[in-house]
Amino acid sequence: MAITPKMWKTIAAFLFIISPLPAFVISLFIGSFGLSINETLGVLVSRIFGTGLDYPGMYNSVIFDVRLPRILTALLVGGALSISGASFQGIFKNPLVDPYILGLSSGAAFGAALSIAILPTLPLEPAAFAFSLLAIGLAYLMARNKGETPVISLVLSGVITSAIFTALLGIVQIKTNEKALQSIVLWIMGTFNASTWSKLNESWYLIVLGCAVIILLRWRLNVLALGDEEAKSVGMNTELYKVLFIVAASLVASASVAIAGIISLVGLIVPHMIRMVIGPDHRLLIPLSFTFGAAFLVIVDDASRAAFGFEIPVSIITTLIGAPFFIFILRRAKVGGWE
Amino acid sequence: MKYSKLLIATILMMVSISLLIAGCTTTNTGASATPSATTTPAPQTVTVIDDRGMTITVPYPCKRIVFLVENAMNTMYAIGGADDIVGIGDIWMPQYKEAFFRAVDPDYNATLKISTSNGADLEALAKAKPDLVVLWSADWNDKDTKAISENLHVPVYGVYLRNFSDIYKQHRDFAKITGNEQRGQQVLDTMNATMKKVTDVTATIPDNQKPTVYWMWGDVYGTAGLHSSTNDLINAAGGKNVLNNWNNDTKYDEHPVLTMEAIQALNPDVIYMWYNPKLDPKDVMTGDDFKAWRNISAVKNGRVYELNDPFLDDSMTSRLPLVVMKIAKNINPDKFASLDLNKEYDAFFVSVYGVHYPGYAKA
């Protein structure tokens, strides 16, 4: 029996859905500590089923305090950035948009730098989170005119907001010492090296909440993607849904950036990958972006923490993978369902 | 109308944030008086070679020097050159240091302050009429060196400390430039004698009995590589940089960044933190964000220490032997049980700076 294109699509969708599971399991066995597969399995079985086998405390710590929170954080952040990117691409009707389009990353970087270099009493993650939301709020308010928020105004105000916060970041950078500067640069590059249960506990519910809103309302993105006039003609309150999607997508991206730093291109390329295989229908695109984005970032992070024995900021690898892929997308005649 | 108000409010907010940041940082620009003396050609000159290998010729004795790098200014105070300082760059964490500077230099408040946050302020420098400018620089062609030497025609001494001997050389150079050779030698003798109190003991510790040390920079996972001056600090204090046991070539970098698993695998006996305003040893030992560190020997045994005083613990100044002493006492407590740090600090300050520690009362 020949496999029809529809069947291929179904198989691909199934693979995208389950992709986080193998990524999660494989990642538990990867790391520079040097635990063998048997030891890792032994520690896992012993902890889960209480077999009573005694393993050194350090082995437990490596798996349950280092790898597990890191993998879960990468899963959540990967899914969040991808779903956020897919939403923004839908709202803006533009394939080149990513979660940072409204100045979120510049705001977060400024907040983090402020905490690292100027106000050490200000906790880093909340500072990054608050300033990323402030940046988005400013961009939205600047774009809003006569009760409407034209897409082109949003894009331009995002560029302006980003420039403002980049300038403010520059002030912090020139005022600080070289060690703090190094910390700022490392934070901006994005890494999961400092993932902990406490950080995960502080942000997982924000990400889940934002993702739940996007997933539940996802079919409306199909209507929004038609354009404001067309959406209004079918009775949709475009402003309300734009605000809802922008708030939800910004919330998940801000919470992600706060715990992991600025991770480039994931929110841009993952939705494209899904769109190329599955098509532009947001009813499938949104959930699959979340699951595949999660798996993608966990695998990339495996490379960043284990491939070289020392830590390479994960954003460097996502950029090195993402940039050629992006060029590939640009050179395609059909941009993954956008034309 | 409403839109315009919003825009104006946004702009005002941005300006306020900029001013707030500027206000929160330490800026010394524009402070205080301009020296009234004028530069007169000196009949003699003196030549030294800076840390970059650049030959510098200045009038002898050099009486008008601007310090845009703080550690070298400390050296100047030690070798008795306070009167020859005519300009001072930005000070990092001045709240910990300025009381000392005022104690050893009565003219500190009046000395021209020159902003260095965006490169050297050339106009402020020109106002100081220096015979020499001292700044942190790794190469001959850095933009500040070029701007100062080409625009102001003032020689520039580049400070770039890579190891202990660079710090000692700095003392010799400034003593020579200012004509304070004898005083310079006295300071070096005190430094050597203080250092010897530590190294005479640590030299006898067999290699396999030296505690392994993980040096924690501000970014937590960043540490001191084997080719760094901090590695020399650990060795002198009788420790062994834990990176010696790491099978990765980046261990020779100045500032390698490790994964948490690599730190766990190396399992250091001691964790030594550089001054970190956001973190204390207690946080590393019991903080929620440091759960993964709990099984590391250093944490299990409560052996996490910090250089917690940005002034006293500055290893790039004459106080280097005091820093080594403090680390040695922490990481080898049994070997230095009888060493009274406060007594040592006071004796050193009296000998090198002519003031007591703490309090900086004239000796």
Image (cartoon, grey):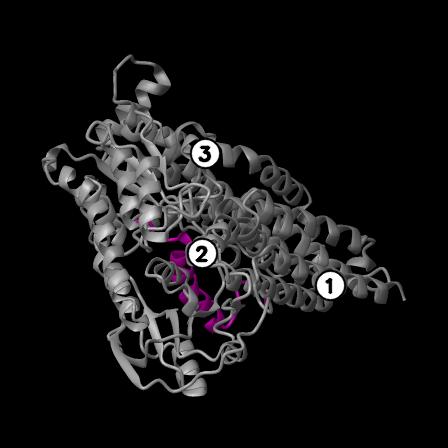
Q: Mark 1 or 2, which is nearer the eye?
A: 2
- Pinpoint residue A79: horizontal percent, then vertical percent: 51, 45
CB contact under 8 Å: marks 3 and 1: no
The quarter of the picture where residue A74 lies is top left
Tag 3, which chain? B
Tag 2, which chain? A
Q: Residue placed at 12% from the left, 41% from the top?
A: B203
Instruction: Specify whether A49 is left or right of B114.
Output: left
Give the SS element for disc 1. Answer: loop
Mark 2 or mark 1, which is nearer the start of the sequence?
A: 2
Q: Please state the extent of the stretch shown in magenta in the rendering.
A: A310-339
- Whether residue B268 appears in this view of the structure is no
What residue is disc 2 on?
A189
Residue at mark 3 to residue at mark 2: CA–CA distance: 20 Å
Q: Residue placed at 28% from the left, 56% from the top?
A: B254
Instruction: Using the rendered image, report if marks 3 and 1 lie on a common chain.
Output: no
Residue B289: which numbered mark, if any? Answer: 3
Instruction: Specify whether B264 is left or right of A220.
Output: left
Amino acid at pointer 1: Gly
Instruction: Using the rendered image, report if marks 1 and 2 lie on a common chain.
Output: yes
- Pinpoint residue A63: horizontal percent, then vertical percent: 34, 31
Residue A227: which numbered mark, if any? Answer: 1
Q: Residue placed at 81% from the left, 58% from the top?
A: A232
CB contact under 8 Å: marks 1 and 2: no
User: Residue A134 lies in magenta, yes or no?
Assistant: no
